């Protein structure tokens, strides 16, 4: 019915090798193209290829101070209003980890051993990113980041008519800039 290797690769790429997402995309395609020929242009629309919902990648690039990649991901990432507190919590948790690592660096200069001994343990995929971020963020900039997170959360909670996605994006930009100052 028109399924090509190129379309299969498109599905895999859009799901980022996440099996659950791949299965969801296959279900979506199966429902839409039932008794129809599969066309690549329709697949691209159906999968909404331009949208990247991986907030963690955006957060990591911003905290690494990578302006180019952060800007690209800001344009591609759709921030759902229902998930605003998830976004804030995710950023806050990372800053807490970086703060803990920063505090422990005074006694032990080896960041890898500090990260290996953290409780709860850091997922192995996140270790290189956290090591890099721990070299960028110092105590003063972490404090500034916590202040920005707090102010953003306050604005979100106190004003129901404000565009919360823009506040989160503004926070991401501010954090990216702060990472470059550190």
Image: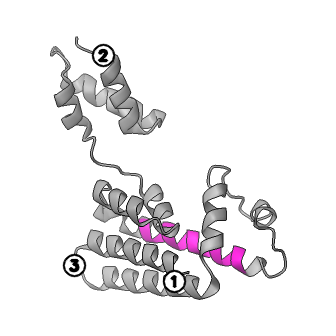
Q: Which numbered disc, 2 or 3, marks the residue that appears first in the sequence?
A: 2
Vertical side of 88 occupied by 72: above or below: above
Task: Classify the position of the N terminus by image quarter.
Answer: top left
Image spot of residue 95 (x, y percent): 57, 74
Nearest the viewer among 89 and 123 is 123
Q: CA separation, marks 3 and 1?
A: 21 Å
Nearest the viewer among 154 and 68 is 68
Q: Which residue is mark 1?
A: 146
**How many numbered circles does the render carry?**
3
**The residue stretch that appears in magenta:** 87-102
Q: Which numbered disc, 3 or 1, marks the residue that appears first in the sequence?
A: 1
Q: Nearer the viewer, mark 2 or mark 3?
A: 2
- Name the image quarter holding residue 103: bottom right
* Residue 126 painted magenta: no
Magenta residues: mostly which secondary structure? helix
Decide: few, some or many residues near mark 3? Use Cα within 10 Å; few <14, some 14-19, many ≥20. few
Image spot of residue 151 (x, y percent): 40, 86
Q: Which residue is mark 3?
A: 162
Image spot of residue 32 (x, y percent): 19, 26
**Secondary element at tag 3:** loop
- Name the image quarter holding residue 43: top left
Task: Classify the position of the C terminus by image quarter.
Answer: bottom right
Q: Which residue is mark 2?
A: 4
Q: CA separation, marks 1 and 2?
A: 48 Å
Residue at (51% x, 87% y) in the render: 144
Image spot of residue 156 (x, y percent): 32, 79
Left or right for 33, reference 175: left
């Amino acid at each position: 019915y028109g399924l090509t290797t190129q379309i299969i690769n498109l599905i895999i790429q859009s799901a980022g090798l996440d099996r659950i997402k791949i299965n969801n995309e296959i279900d979506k395609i199966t429902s839409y193209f039932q008794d129809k020929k599969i066309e690549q242009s329709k697949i691209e629309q159906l999968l909404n290829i331009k949208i990247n919902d991986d907030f963690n990648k955006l957060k990591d690039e911003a905290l690494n101070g990578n302006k180019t990649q952060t800007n690209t991901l800001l344009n591609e990432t759709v921030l759902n209003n229902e998930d605003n507190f998830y976004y804030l919590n995710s950023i806050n948790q990372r800053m807490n980890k970086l703060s803990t690592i920063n505090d422990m660096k005074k006694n032990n200069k080896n960041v890898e051993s500090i990260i290996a001994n953290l409780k709860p343990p850091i997922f192995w995929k996140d270790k290189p990113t956290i090591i890099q971020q721990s070299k960028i963020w110092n105590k003063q900039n972490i404090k500034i980041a916590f202040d920005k997170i707090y102010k953003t959360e306050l604005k979100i909670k106190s004003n129901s008519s404000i565009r919360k996605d823009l506040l989160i994006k503004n926070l991401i930009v501010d954090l990216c800039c702060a990472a470059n100052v550190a």
